[in-house]
Amino acid sequence: MQGGSSGIGYGLKYQARCISDVKADRDHTSFLTGTLSLKEENEVHLLRLSSGGSELLCEGLFSHPNEIWDLACCPFDQRIFSTVFSTGESFGAAIWQIPEPYGQSNSSTLECVASLDAHVGKINCVLWCPSGNSDKLVSMDEQNLVLWSLDSSKKSAEVLSKESAGMRHSLSGGAWNPHDVNSVAATSESSIQFWDLRTMKKVNSIERAHVRNVDYNLKREHILVSADDESGIHLWDLRKTNVPVQELPGHTHWTWAVRCNPEYEELILSVGTDSAVNLWFASVSNENKPSGSPVEASRQRVNPLLNSYTDYEDSVYGLAWSSREPWIFASLSYDGRVVIESVKPFLPRR
Amino acid sequence: MATEAAPMDEKAKRMRDLLSSFYAPDPSISTSNSSISASFDNINSTSFDADQYMDLMIKKSNLEVLLQRHVQMAAEIKNLDTDLQMLVYENYNKFISATDTIKRMKSNIFGMEGNMDQLLQKIMSVQSRSDGVNTSLFEKREHIEKLHRTRNLLRKVQFIYDLPARLQKCIKSEAYGDAVRFYTGAMPILKVYGDTSFQDCRRASEEAIEIIIKNLQTKLFSDSESIQARAEAAVLLKQLDVPVDSLKAKLLEKLEQSLDGLQIKPEEASKLVEHDDSSNDTESNDQHPAKIHEDAVRGFSEAMRAYREIFPDSEERLFKLARALTAMHFENMELYIRKRVSAADFLGIFRIIWEDVVLMDEVLPEAALSDLSAEAAQVTLKQFVARTFSHLQQDISDTLLKFDINQKEAVEGEILKVILEASQKAVLQGTTNIFQDFRQLLDENAGIFIKMRDLISGWIQKGFQDFFRSLEAQFLVLSGKTSASNDIEGKSSDKIHAGLILVLAQLSVFIEQKVISRVTEEIAASFSGGNSQAFENGPAFIPGELCRVFHAASEKLLQHYIDTRTQKVSVLLRKRFKTPNWVKHKEPREVHMYVDMFLHELEEVGKEVKQVLPQGTFRKHKRTDSNGSNTTTSSRSNTLHSDKMTRSNSQRARSQLFETHLAKLFKQKVEIFTKVEFTQESVVTTTVKLCLKSLQEYVRLQTFNRSGFQQIQLDIQFLKAPLKETVEDEAAIDFLLDEVIVAASERCLDVIPLEPPILDKLIQAKLAKSKEHNNNTVSS
C-alpha cells in the first residue's frame, strides 16, 4: 500500500485542523478550510477543484480573526459557514458569510452573520441541520448543547433551547442524524449520547469510552460509525447498541476522524495521527440483503482496508468527502497540506 | 371296422376305404379319412374324373407306359372283382352261423327256472338258522359287553384313585414328564366328576401337580440345570396350562435386571482396567473385576442361549435385550470418557465391551450386534478423539489461567516466564501424549478398530486442525481481543492481565514455529491414511493454514498487548492534560509526577517483556551492569548530553515555526510506526513511541502560557534520559520528544523556555527525590 502520489496538493500557510465540503455549491467541487495559528493572522481558504479535476485552485482567501478549531459549511447557502475559534484563552463560535462577489478579491474580510455566544466553556463544534434548507444549528461545548435558529437575512441567531449534559460528561463533538432531523449524536468522555432536539433530552447512549468522532451513514439508516483513540473504528446499529456490528482496526496511532461516503454505503474513510488516511470497505450485511458477489465478500473478509494513503508529513485531522463527486475526498494534515484524492479505483462494482 | 387303426398293406387299406365309403353315406367323412391319398389322379377318390384322368395320362405318358398302365389296371379290376365275390360269400357264411347259434340258445334256456327256485329255498333256510343262533347268543354277549365296560370304568377309577400316589412317586423319581402325562389323562374325568365323587382324589392330585409345577418352575429358573432339562420343564409347564408367557416375561425380566449388574459403571470402569493391568503382575488377587465381569457376561449370553432354545418365540425380546446391553455399554462408555481417560483405559474398556459383544453375537447372530456396536463404537471413538482434544485445550487454558490467579500474590517473581514455560510445556506434552494415545488406538487390533483405522486417522487430522483453530480462538478470547460469544464469562477486558496477552502472543509464536511442524511430522509418520477417502475436500490437517492463523494471531496479540499497555498510559496522559488550566499555569517547580507513573508503566512493560520475549539481535547501546553506582554516572553523562539538547531545544523553540518546518524538511523523516517484532526491545520501543505520539497529540490540543510550556519542557527533558536507557531506537525517541516540545511551543502564547541551569537543577532535585523514595521503599 503505497502513499498515492495521485493526490492533488494545496498548501496552507499555517497549521490547520478542519476542512469542509461546500455542499451547497452544486456547480463545483469545493472545499472550505481554515488555519489554526495562535499567533499569526488566520485564514479561510475556499478551494475549488478545476473542471478537469487536475488542479486545486484557491477561489477565495479570507482573513479570520482567530484560530479555527472547527468549520462547517451551510448545506443550503454556499456562501455561509460556521467556525469555532479560540483566542487562546477563550472560545467562540460564529456564522460567517463570504462577501460577494468572491473569487477575485483576495483577503477580503468575512461578514459575520451571527455570533453563537451562548457558551462559556470550550466549544467543540457547530452542526448544521442536514435536511438541506432548515435554518437550525446545534452548537456544543463541553457541557452544553444549544439549538439555534438562524435568520441569515436579519443577521441574527436565536437560541431555541439549551440543555446541559452535566458536568461529568464532557462532550467532545457530534453528528446530526441525516435520517432523523430531531436526533443528534454527541460524543462524550464515556459514551456516545443521542439527544432528541424536540425535548432536549438524552434518549439513548452507547457506552464507549474515548470516542473521538462519529458519523452517520447517509445511505443506511441506523448505522453509525465511531472512531476511538485506541481501539479503532466501530460500526453500530442504533437499534442494538450493546455490541458493535463491525470492528475495523483503525490506525496505528489514534483514529482521529471517520467519514462515511455519501453515495457508496460501504466506503468509510478515516484519518489518524499516524499520518495516514485509510479507506475501508465495510458492508454491514443484513440477512435480507445479499451483499455483493462472493468475490467481493471474500475480499472484504480478507482485508477490509482497501487502501492507505500515507503521503503525509504530519497527523491528519481534517477529512471531507465531496458530496458532488462522491469518489473525491479532501484531507488536511496538521502542517496545512490539503490533499484531494479520488477513490475511483476502489469503488465497488455495481 | 373301418376305424381299426393297424398297419396294413396297400390292398387292405384300399379295401377298408372302399368299405367305409360303402357304409358311410356321407362322402365328406370318407374323403377326410382318405385325405392322405386324395389327390387329383387318385382313382379311389370320389371326385375322380375318368376323362380328365385319361387326358392327363395321354398327355403325360407315352404309349408304352399307357399300355403298361392298361395291363396293370385290368389286373387290378380283376382282383377287385374276386375280392368282392369273396366278401359276399364270407358274409353269407357268417349269417348262417348266427342263425344256428340262436337256435341253440333257445333250446338251452328251458329248465333253468326250476334250478333257480331250489337256490332260493336253500338261502332261506340258511337265513333262518343264522337268526336262531343270533337270538340264542344275544343275551350272553350283551352281558359280556356290560362286564367289559364296567371293568374299564373300574380301571379308570382305580387310575384316578391311584393318581396322587402315582404323582408323588413321579415327584420322588423326578419323572415329571410321566406325571404330567398321567395328570393330563385324568384331567377330563376330574373336570367332570371332580366336584362330587373324586373330590379328595382331585384335591390330592392337584396338590401333587402344584408341587410338580413348582418344581418345574424352580427347575426352569435354576441356572444350574441343563438347558434341555429346562426346556423340557418349560414344555411340561406349557402342557399343564401354566401361563408360560408370564413365566417367560418373568425370566426375561430377571435377565433384564441382570443387565444392571453387567453395566460397566463409569465409576468402576477405571477400576476394571486397573485391575486388569495389575493382575498380570500379582496373581494373588483372587478375582479381579474384569474377570468377574467377563464371567457375568458369559453367564448372560449362556442364559440368552438357553432362553432362545426354551422360548423360540422370544427372540425379538432377546435381541432387544442384547441391543440394550450393547447400547448401555456404549452409553456408559460415553459417560466414562466424559471424564479424562487415557487411551489405554479407553481401549481396555473398549476391549471388554467388544468381547461382550462378540460373546453375545455368537448367541444371537441375527441381532446384528456387531453392526450396531460398530456404529456405536464409531460414535464413541469420535467423541473420544474430540474429547481428548478439548481436554488438551482445557489443560492449556488452565495452565495459563492458573498462574494468572496467583499473579496477584507473586508479582515480583518471574511469573510470566513461569506461565510461558508451563504453557509451552503443556502444549508440547499434551500433543505428545495425544499422539501416544492415538497411536495406541491405531495399534489396537480389536475387530472394529481395523475397519475404522482410516476413519480414525481422518478424525485425528481433523481433530488437530479444529483443535488449533479453536485454540487460536480461545487465545483471542482469553486476551480479551474478541469478546466471548456470550458475556456470561464476566471477564471484562480490564481484568485480563496485560502480561497474559504477551504470554499468549509468545505462545502463538511457539505453536507456529515448533508445535505445528512437529504435529505435521507426527501425522505424516503415523496418521497419514484416511485422507483420500474420508475427506474429499483435501486433507483435513493443513499446517500451512494453521501457521498462517497462528502467525496472524501472534501479531494480533502482540499488538493487543501494546495497545492495552499504551491505553493505560494514554488514560494517564489524558487526565494530566485535561485537568489543569494550561493557560493559567503556574511556574514549574518540579517535574510532574505523571512522568513517574509513565516511567513506572514502562518499567512494568520492560519487566514483562524480559520474561517472555527473546532479546533482539542487536542493541544500540549496552549498559549491561545496571547497579546503583552506575546509574548515577550514566545519569550524569546524560545530563551533559541533555545540556546540549536543551540548548538546541530552546533555540528551536525561540525560532519561528517556519524554521522548524525547514528543519524538519532537512531532517530525515523518522519512521515512527515501524513493524513490531518479537523482541524485547522492539516491543518496548513501540510502546514508548506510541505513548510519546499520544503525548504530542494531547499537547497539540491545548494552549499554554509560558509556564505551561516550561512545565512541558521540564517534563520532557526529564523523560529523555530514562527513555533512551530503555529504547533501542534513540533517533526516533529524540525526534518524538523534540516533536512534543515543538508542539508545545506552537501551542504556546509566549514561548520562553526555561534556562538550562534551572532545568538541570529541577531535574537533579527530582532524581534525588526519586532515589530517596526508592531507598525508602527498599528500607521499608
Image (tube, coloured by chain):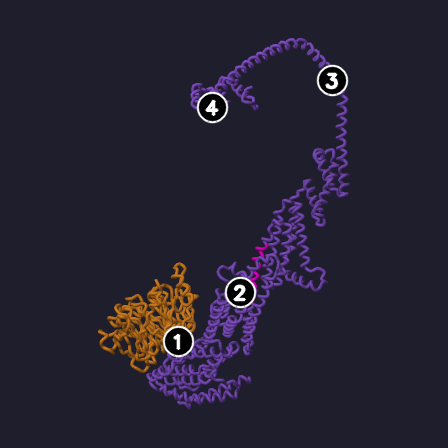
Chain colours: A orange, B purple
Distance of label 4 from label 2 (alpha carbons): 102 Å
Instruction: Give the letter of the chain under mark 1.
Output: A
Label 2 sits on residue = B464
The one of A3 and A305 positioned closer to us in this rendering: A3
Residue B149 visible within the image:
yes
Highlighted range, magenta:
B373-394
- Callout 1 touching callout 2 (CB < 8 Å): no
Instruction: Give the letter of the chain under mark 4.
Output: B
Label 4 sits on residue = B39
Distance of label 1 from label 4 (alpha carbons): 129 Å
Estimate the x, y position of residue A239 in percent, counting from the top left. 40, 63
Label 1 sits on residue = A274
The circle drawn on residue B130 is: 3
> What kind of residue is marked 1?
Asp
In the rendered view, tell whether residue B460 sits above or below residue A155.
above
Q: Which residue reaches farthest bottom?
A: B757
Horizontal side, residue B186 vs residue A124: left or right:
right
Q: Which mark is first along the chain, 2 or 4? A: 4
In front: label 1 or label 3: 3
Task: Give the total of numbered labels.
Answer: 4
Tell me which corner region of the image, top left, top right, bottom left or bottom right, holds residue B117.
top right
Distance of label 4 from label 3 (alpha carbons): 77 Å
Distance of label 1 from label 2 (alpha carbons): 40 Å
The circle drawn on residue A332 is: none
